[in-house]
Amino acid sequence: MDYFKGISLFSELTNEEREKISCFCQIRDLSEWEILFKEWDEWTAMYVLVDWAVEVYKDSIDGRVLLWEIHSEDVLWEMALIWNSHKRMASAVAIKDSRLITILSFSIDELFKKYPDLLNKIKTIILERERINEITLN
C-alpha cells in the first residue's frame, strides 16, 4: 500500500520510493482533543497528517500557548529526524478527528539503514518545505 500517494509534499518521490517508505508505516486515528504527545516526551515517531488538523502548543502559567496548527498533508515532528533531538519541545492535540501516517522511530532507523539515499531525499524535501514556510511567514 502506498500511504503517500496523492500527498503533495512527497510528490517528488518515485512510486518505488513511496512504496518503500509505506512498508514502514501505519495509520493512526486520533479523536477530537486526543493528545498525540506531550512536551518532554521521548521522540517515538514522525507523523504525516492525512486528514484534518493538530494544534502544537506549550503549557505556561497562563495556560496553553498555541505555537501553530498542522493541517492535512503536512509533517509533524520531522525536525527530530533531522536534528537528532530525542525530546519533544511542545505538545500536540487533535482539534478534530484526525488521521495520521505514523513512522515509528525504530522503523525510521531500519528504513534508512536499508535506503540511506532515501533519507537524504526526504530531509531535502522537509528542509525545503521549512524554508518556504519561513519565507511565507516573513
Image: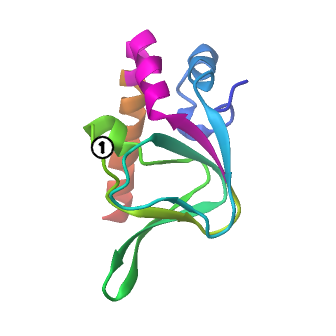
Total number of numbered discs in the rendering: 1
In the rendered image, which residue does mark 1 sit on? 86
**Residue 38 to residue 87: above or below:** below
Residue 115 image offset from top left, x and y in percent = 44, 12
Secondary structure mostly taken by the magenta-highlighted segment of the chain: helix
**Residue 114 to residue 9: above or below:** above
Q: Quadrant of the C terminus?
A: bottom left
In terms of depth relative to the viewer, which is nearer, 25 or 69? 25
Residue 34 image offset from top left, x and y in percent = 61, 65
Q: Quadrant of the N terminus?
A: top right
Residue 17 forms part of the magenta stretch: no
Residue 107 image offset from top left, x and y in percent = 49, 26
Residue furthest out toward the bottom: 62
Quadrant in the rendering for residue 82: top left
Quadrant in the rendering for residue 13: top right
Q: Residue at x 41, y 18 (%)?
A: 112
Give the secondary structure at mark 1. loop
Disc 1 marks a residue whose amino acid type is: His
Q: Residue at x 58, y 31 (%)?
A: 11
**Residue 123 to residue 78: above or below:** above
Q: Residue at x 39, y 14 (%)?
A: 113
Residue 79 image offset from top left, x and y in percent = 34, 44
Few, some or many residues within 10 Å of mark 1 (<14, 14–19, 20+): few
The stretch of residues the image draws in magenta is: 99-119
